[in-house]
């Protein structure tokens, strides 16, 4: 369910954004729940740095699939990664 739903979501985004490229999803844990992390690259309208890196996290919940996306410019990857990691590490889901 998690892999299929995440692939379906990413495929839908790729249909509307031909610049979007997704890497193979990696298994991770968020709030004690199995999750996937998918690194996506695409272009933005920002002239100075048109590239964008998005980390898409997906988790299956009883209510359906839950997503969080963290986006950054490639030049900021080293700076923002610890902040993004801290955000993901502090997420909790009610049972």
Image: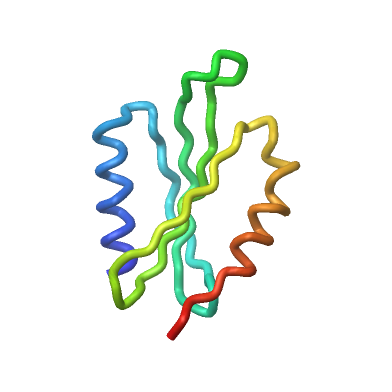
Name, please, the residue furthest toward the front.
Answer: 94
Q: Quadrant of residue 15?
A: top left
Identify the residue at horizontal 31%, vertical 77% (top origin): 62
What quarter of the picture does the C terminus occupy? bottom left
Q: Which quarter of the figure has residue 63? A: bottom left
Query: Horizontal and vertical percent for residue 18?
Result: 32, 27
Q: Is residue 35 above or below residue 43?
A: below
* Number of marks in picture: 0
* Residue furthest out toward the bottom: 95
| Left or right: residue 86 compared with residue 29 | right
Left or right side of 72 for 57: left
Q: Position of residue 53 (x, y in %)?
A: 54, 37
Q: Residue at x 54, y 47 (%)?
A: 70
Question: Taking 80 as reference, is 21 left or right?
Answer: left
Horizontal and vertical percent position of residue 56:
46, 51
The colour scheme used to paint the residues is rainbow
Nearer the observer, 23 or 93: 93
Residue at image location 26% in from the left, 32% down from the top = 16
User: In the image, what residue occupies the spot 46% across and 58% down?
Assistant: 57
Please say if 26 is above or below 79.
below
- Quick one: quadrant of the N terminus? bottom left
Q: Is residue 84 above or below residue 73?
A: below
| Residue 71 spot, x, y in % from top left | 54, 41
Left or right: 89 as drawn, with respect to 58: right
95 or 2, nearer to the observer:
95
């Amino acid at each position: 369910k998690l892999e299929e739903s995440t692939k379906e979501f990413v495929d839908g985004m790729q249909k509307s954004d031909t610049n979007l490229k997704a890497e193979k999803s990696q298994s991770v844990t968020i709030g004690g729940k199995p999750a996937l992390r998918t690194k996506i690259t695409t272009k933005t309208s920002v002239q100075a740095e048109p590239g964008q890196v998005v980390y898409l996290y997906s988790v299956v919940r009883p209510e359906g699939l839950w997503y969080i996306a963290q986006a950054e410019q490639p030049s900021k990857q080293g700076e923002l990664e610890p902040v993004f990691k801290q955000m993901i590490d502090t997420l909790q889901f009610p049972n």
